[in-house]
């Protein structure tokens, strides 16, 4: 039995990503595929170079189609259950890079229905209003306003529902139980919900009146949805949806992913920057018990949440990252100093993000689509 859990609703324990690839039946992004991506895009994005995006479904096919002149659309999303945290930004940063590189459309789903049905938000009205709050963070990422379409499930239901119904008819309860672990006590809205998350995979084809490849960048927790969608696709006359999966940004504590349910170890985009800085200063590190010991034996960046933040979000320069890694291992940099510098970077990032978020309020209408 694995001592970790990865489902769309729960991520815990120390994740063996290689094993997850086998269990989920996805493919590793290997050197050959990295070479192909590099050939098409030029220098690899740091999230690919560092194995942060590590797994995929049919990404090689997406690239081939693109080269043949059959461009793909991007699809990703957010379950609006509270404020956005830095972990959520990881796939969005990469999605923005893909949009810029390939100059393609992005369909962004806000699942207000999901968060209500699964009980993370007490009322549907509240999750719907959180969707519009979270959309400000999405817009603040700098997506192309002419090529990006953000929608909430309830406000775009007239368009999404007919697609969802067709997926739902092809998905049996026994499959849904096996994939999602639904039980007799599960409410029937939750059982139908996966069909709603499937719908945007086929939306570009329907809107364009032409079969369109779709690539989904997201963390690997969302993959179970893509399995049932891929099974339904050929029967409905669509291409199978492709996906590219990232690992999880850890929380600031010891182990576990960044999660809104643990607000002290998560940095939210709406946190006052100084408060976020304080959270960083309290983070779990790979430091030794005493300063003397650390100077002598060094720290362990491999288990350090602070090092992970540099690696995943706050140090794009590979040689500077390596310098930091070595300085930690050799005891040349102490945790206090390393945390202080990260806190500064996080505060600066939040200040800028919050300004963009404020400006996004005026752009909401340009990005949001409704029936
Ligand atoms: P949600 O709101 O849980 O997460 C939004 C996106 O963030 C990813 N994610 C993380 N990535 C890295 N580190 C973390 N600690 C972390 N926590 C969350 C998620 O994988 C996701 O990409 N059901 C979905 C909403 C949705 C969706 C989609 C997501 C609808 N359609 C298409 C991705 C793609 C949800 O609740 O996401």
Image: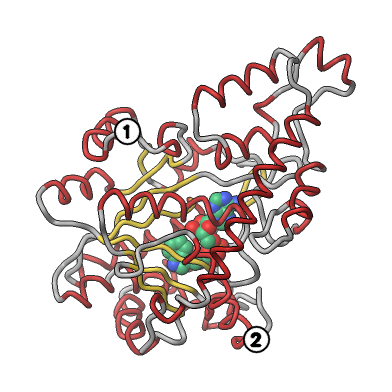
Q: Front-most of 136 and 167? A: 136
Q: Front-most of 122 and 187? A: 122
Q: Are marks 2 and 1 in contact (CB under 8 Å)?
A: no
The residue sitting at 61% across, 53% down in the picture is 86
Q: Measured from the top left, where is residue 313 in percent x and y?
A: 56, 42
Dot 1 alpha-carbon crowd within 10 angstroms: few under 14, some 14 to 19, many 20 or more: few
Q: Which residue corresponds to mark 1?
A: 43
Which labelled disc corresponds to residue 123? 2
The relative height of residue 131 versus residue 255 in the rendered view (above or below) is below
The relative height of residue 202 versus residue 334 in the rendered view (above or below) is below
In the drawing, does residue 221 fall left or right of residue 105? right
The residue sitting at 32% across, 52% down in the picture is 100
Q: Front-most of 232 and 348? A: 348
The relative height of residue 261 versus residue 291 in the rendered view (above or below) is below
Image quarter where the N terminus lies is top right
In the drawing, does residue 220 fall left or right of residue 303? left
Q: Is residue 6 visible?
A: no
Work out whether mark 2 precedes mark 1 in sequence or the reverse, and give the earlier one: 1
Q: Residue furthest left?
A: 68
Q: Residue furthest top?
A: 296
Q: Measured from the top left, where is residue 291 in percent x and y?
A: 87, 20
The residue sitting at 67% across, 64% down in the picture is 270
């Amino acid at each position: 039995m694995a001592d970790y859990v990865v489902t769309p609703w729960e991520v815990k324990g120390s994740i063996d990503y290689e094993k997850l690839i086998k269990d989920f039946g996805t493919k590793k992004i290997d050197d050959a595929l990295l070479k192909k991506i590099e050939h098409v895009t030029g220098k690899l994005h740091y999230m690919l170079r560092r194995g942060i995006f590590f797994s995929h479904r049919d990404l090689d096919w997406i690239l081939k189609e693109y080269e043949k002149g059959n461009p793909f659309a991007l699809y990703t999303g957010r379950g609006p259950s509270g404020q956005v945290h830095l972990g959520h930004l990881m796939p969005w940063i990469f999605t923005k890079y893909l949009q810029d590189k390939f100059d393609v459309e992005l369909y962004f789903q806000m699942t207000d229905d999901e968060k209500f049905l699964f009980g993370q938000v007490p009322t549907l009205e509240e999750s719907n209003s959180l969707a519009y709050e979270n959309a400000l963070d999405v817009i603040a990422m700098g997506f192309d306003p002419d090529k990006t379409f953000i929608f909430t499930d309830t406000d775009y239901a007239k368009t999404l529902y007919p697609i969802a119904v067709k997926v739902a008819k092809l998905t049996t309860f026994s499959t849904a139980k096996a994939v999602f672990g639904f039980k007799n006590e599960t409410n029937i809205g939750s059982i139908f919900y996966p069909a709603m998350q499937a719908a945007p995979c086929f939306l570009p084809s329907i809107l364009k009146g032409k079969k369109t490849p779709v690539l989904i960048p997201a963390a690997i927790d969302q993959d179970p949805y893509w399995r049932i969608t891929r099974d339904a696709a050929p029967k409905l006359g669509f291409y199978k949806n492709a996906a590219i999966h990232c690992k999880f940004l850890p929380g600031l504590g010891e182990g576990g992913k960044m999660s809104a349910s643990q607000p002290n170890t998560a940095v939210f985009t709406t946190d006052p920057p100084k408060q976020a800085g304080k959270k960083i200063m309290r983070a779990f590190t790979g430091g030794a018990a005493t300063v003397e010991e650390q100077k002598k034996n060094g720290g362990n960046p491999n288990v350090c949440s602070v090092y992970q933040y540099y690696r995943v979000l706050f140090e794009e320069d590979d040689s500077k990252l390596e310098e930091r890694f070595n300085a930690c291992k050799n005891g040349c940099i102490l945790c206090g100093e390393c945390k202080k510098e990260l806190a500064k970077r996080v505060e600066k990032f939040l200040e800028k993000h919050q300004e963009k978020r404020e400006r996004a309020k005026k752009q909401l209408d340009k990005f949001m689509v409704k029936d």
